[in-house]
C-alpha cells in the first residue's frame, strides 16, 4: 500500500506553483496597494486572518470563476495557490468570507479598485485618453415573481382613497364626529369608546365581533394599506417597479429569457468603462435605459481618478441632447452614434420628402418649406426638463396653409388644421457633428475598438467567466461583487498581456471601414 502520510508533502507550497501562474501577478500588484481604509474597518473588531490576505483570496477566487463563499472555503483547503496565499493560516469558513465581502469591503472596494487603475496608469497600460462605455443587464439575486409595479400601487391607492372618501363621512355622522375628522381620529375615538363601554375585542373562528370592533378593524386595515402603498412609492422613487426580495432591483427585459415570452426579470443595469482592454470605471443603476446613466457615470469616474477622458465612445443608446451638451461643456469629444444614424442611410428614409429632416430649411428666415412649396413659419419655443433637470428647447413651426394640399394625407395626420412640427436646433447641430466625427478615420477605428473592447469585456465576464446572476442582494453588496469581478478581470488581463507581450497596446488598429 502507498504511503499517504501528509508529512511527506512539501511544506513550501511556493515550489508547487507554476512560474506563469496569475497568482504571482495578483500578489505583485496587491502588495503595492494602500490598505489603510480596509484596516480601519477592523479597528474595533477582532480578526483571525489578515484583511489583506482575505482580499487577495477573494480576488484570486474571482479570477478563477469561484464566486460562492462555500466554494472559496473549499478552495482554501484543497488548492495549493490558496494555501500559499494564506501563508500557513487556517482556511476561513464560508461565513467569514461572506461577512468580509458584504460588510468589510463594501465601503473600501472602490478605493482599492481606483488604486489598481492608477497602478495600471503608472505601468503605462492606461493613458486616460479613450474610454469605451457600454452597459448590460445582469439578473439580481431576487425572486422573479415578487414584483411591485408603480402603476398598480398608484391605481390601488386611488381606489382606496375613493373608498375612504365615501365611507369616512358616514362614519363621522354615525359616531357624531366632525366632518373634518381623519381616519386616525376615527380610530382613536373607537378605541376610547371600547374602553369606556368595556368592550373586549375578539378574534378567531366562532367569535362574534361588535359593531365598534368591525368599524375599527376596517379603518385600521385602511390605514395599514395606505402606509404600505406610501412605503412602496418611496422605494420606487422614479422607477416603474422593484422586487420585494431585493428592493434596489428593477424589473427589466433580459436577453436570457428562460420562459421565452419576453418576461421581465429583476436586474441591475451594469455600466462599465474600458480603456486598453482594462475596466476603469463601474456603475450599477436601477433604470434600464443607458441614456440617463452616462453623466453620473462620467462624474463618478472623474471624482475617482481626478481627471477627464479626452474621447468618449459609446453606442446610439447614449445619444441625447443632454449627453452631447454635457460633453461639449467639459471639452470631451463625443464619439456617440446618433440614434437615427442607421435609419438615415436607408433609401426609404432619404426618399421620404415629408420627414422633418428632409424638409428644406432656411436658416436666415428661420422657416421650413414643405413639398407643396408652403412655408412652415416659426411659431414659438417650448421647453421640457429631463430627469436630471436639463432643459431641452424645441422650436415649433406651423404651415401657413394646408388647405387643398395634394400631399395632405401623406404629409400630415395630426389633429391641427395646418401641419405643426417640432425641431431642436441644438440637437440637429450636435447630430451632424457626431455623424461627421464617427465617420472620420479616427472615428471608425474607435467605433471598431468599442465593439472589441467593451463588448468583449462583457463577453468575457458573462460567457467565459459565467457570471450572469448576482449572488448578493442590495445595491451596495451587489456593486461590491461587481468591483471584485472587475478587479479580477484587470489582473487576469495584465497577466495575459504580459505573457503574450502585448503590454502598451491601446487600440486594435484596423483599416477604416
Image (cartoon, rainbow, N blue to C red):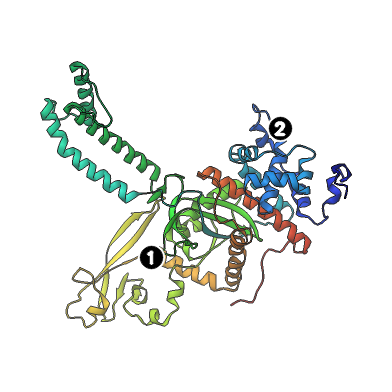
Residue 327 placement (x, y as % from top left):
51, 57
Q: Quadrant of residue 445?
A: bottom right
Of label 1 and label 2, which has the lower sequence position?
2
Q: Nearer the viewer, residue 165 or 239?
A: 165
Is residue 501 toward the left or the right of residue 339 in the image? right
Q: Nearer the viewer, residue 202 or 24?
A: 202
At mark 2, the secondary structure is loop
> Which of the labelled discs sits on residue 48, or is there none?
2
Foreground label between 1 and 2:
2
Residue 513 placement (x, y as % from top left):
58, 77
Q: Nearer the viewer, residue 273 or 512?
A: 273
Q: Residue at x 44, y 65 (%)?
A: 260
User: In the rendered view, would you say 290 is above or below 483?
Assistant: below
Is residue 496 toward the left or the right of residue 450 in the image? right
| Residue at the front extreme, as displayed | 1
User: In the rendered view, would you say 81 is above or below 433?
Assistant: above
> Which of the labelled discs sits on residue 425, or is there none?
1
Q: Nearer the viewer, residue 460 or 321?
A: 460
At mark 1, the secondary structure is helix
Residue 427 placement (x, y as % from top left):
41, 64
Contact between marks 1 and 2 (CB within 8 A): the answer is no
Give neighbour class at mark 1: few <14, some 14-19, many 20+ (Cα, 10 Å). few
User: In the rendered view, would you say 410 is above or below 181?
Assistant: below
Amino acid at each position: 500500500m502507498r504511503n499517504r502520510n501528509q508529512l511527506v508533502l512539501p511544506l513550501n507550497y511556493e515550489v508547487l506553483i507554476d512560474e506563469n501562474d496569475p497568482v504571482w501577478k495578483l500578489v505583485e500588484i496587491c502588495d503595492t496597494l494602500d490598505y489603510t481604509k480596509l484596516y480601519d474597518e477592523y479597528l474595533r473588531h477582532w480578526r483571525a486572518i489578515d484583511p489583506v490576505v482575505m482580499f487577495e483570496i477573494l480576488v484570486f477566487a474571482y479570477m478563477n470563476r469561484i464566486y460562492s463563499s462555500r466554494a472559496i472555503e473549499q478552495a482554501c483547503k484543497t488548492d495549493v495557490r490558496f494555501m500559499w496565499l494564506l501563508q500557513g493560516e487556517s482556511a476561513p469558513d464560508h461565513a467569514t468570507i461572506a461577512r468580509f465581502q458584504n460588510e468589510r469591503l463594501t465601503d473600501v472596494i472602490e478605493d482599492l479598485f481606483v488604486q489598481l487603475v492608477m497602478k495600471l496608469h503608472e505601468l503605462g497600460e492606461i493613458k486616460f485618453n479613450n474610454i469605451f462605455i457600454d452597459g448590460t443587464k445582469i439578473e439580481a439575486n431576487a425572486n422573479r415573481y415578487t414584483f411591485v409595479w408603480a402603476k398598480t400601487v398608484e391605481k390601488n391607492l386611488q381606489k382606496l382613497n375613493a373608498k375612504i372618501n365615501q365611507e369616512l363621512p358616514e362614519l363621522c355622522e354615525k359616531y357624531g364626529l366632525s366632518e373634518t375628522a381623519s381616519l386616525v381620529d376615527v380610530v382613536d375615538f373607537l378605541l376610547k369608546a371600547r374602553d369606556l363601554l368595556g368592550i373586549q375585542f375578539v378574534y378567531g373562528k366562532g367569535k362574534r365581533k361588535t359593531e365598534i370592533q368591525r368599524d375599527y378593524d376596517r379603518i385600521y386595515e385602511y390605514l395599514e394599506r395606505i402606509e404600505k402603498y406610501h412605503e412602496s412609492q418611496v422605494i420606487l422613487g422614479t422607477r416603474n417597479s422593484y422586487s420585494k426580495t431585493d428592493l434596489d432591483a428593477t424589473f427589466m427585459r433580459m436577453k436570457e429569457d428562460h420562459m421565452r415570452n419576453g418576461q421581465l426579470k429583476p436586474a441591475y443595469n451594469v455600466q462599465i468603462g474600458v480603456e486598453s482592454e482594462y475596466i476603469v470605471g463601474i456603475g450599477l443603476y436601477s433604470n434600464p435605459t443607458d441614456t440617463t446613466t452616462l453623466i453620473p457615470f462620467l462624474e463618478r469616474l472623474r471624482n475617482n481618478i481626478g481627471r477627464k477622458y479626452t474621447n468618449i465612445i459609446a453606442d446610439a443608446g447614449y445619444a441625447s441632447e443632454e449627453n452631447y451638451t454635457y460633453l461639449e461643456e467639459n471639452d470631451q469629444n463625443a464619439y456617440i452614434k446618433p440614434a437615427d444614424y442607421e435609419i438615415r442611410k436607408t433609401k426609404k428614409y432619404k426618399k421620404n420628402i415629408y420627414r422633418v429632416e428632409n424638409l428644406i430649411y432656411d436658416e436666415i428666415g428661420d422657416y421650413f418649406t414643405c413639398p407643396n412649396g408652403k412655408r412652415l413659419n416659426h411659431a414659438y419655443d417650448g421647453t421640457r426638463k429631463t430627469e436630471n433637470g436639463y432643459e431641452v428647447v424645441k422650436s415649433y413651426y406651423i404651415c401657413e396653409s394646408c388647405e387643398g394640399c395634394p400631399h395632405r394625407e401623406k404629409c400630415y395626420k395630426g389633429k391641427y388644421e395646418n401641419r405643426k412640427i417640432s425641431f431642436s436646433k441644438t440637437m440637429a447641430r450636435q447630430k451632424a457633428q457626431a455623424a461627421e466625427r464617427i465617420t472620420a478615420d479616427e472615428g471608425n477605428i474607435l467605433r471598431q475598438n468599442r465593439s472589441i473592447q467593451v463588448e468583449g469585456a462583457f463577453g468575457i465576464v458573462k460567457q467565459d467567466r459565467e457570471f450572469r446572476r448576482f449572488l448578493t442582494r442590495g445595491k451596495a453588496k451587489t456593486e461590491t461583487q461587481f468591483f471584485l469581478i472587475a478587479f479580477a478581470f484587470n489582473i487576469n488581463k495584465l497577466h495575459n498581456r504580459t505573457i503574450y507581450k502585448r503590454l502598451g497596446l491601446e487600440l486594435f488598429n484596423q483599416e477604416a471601414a
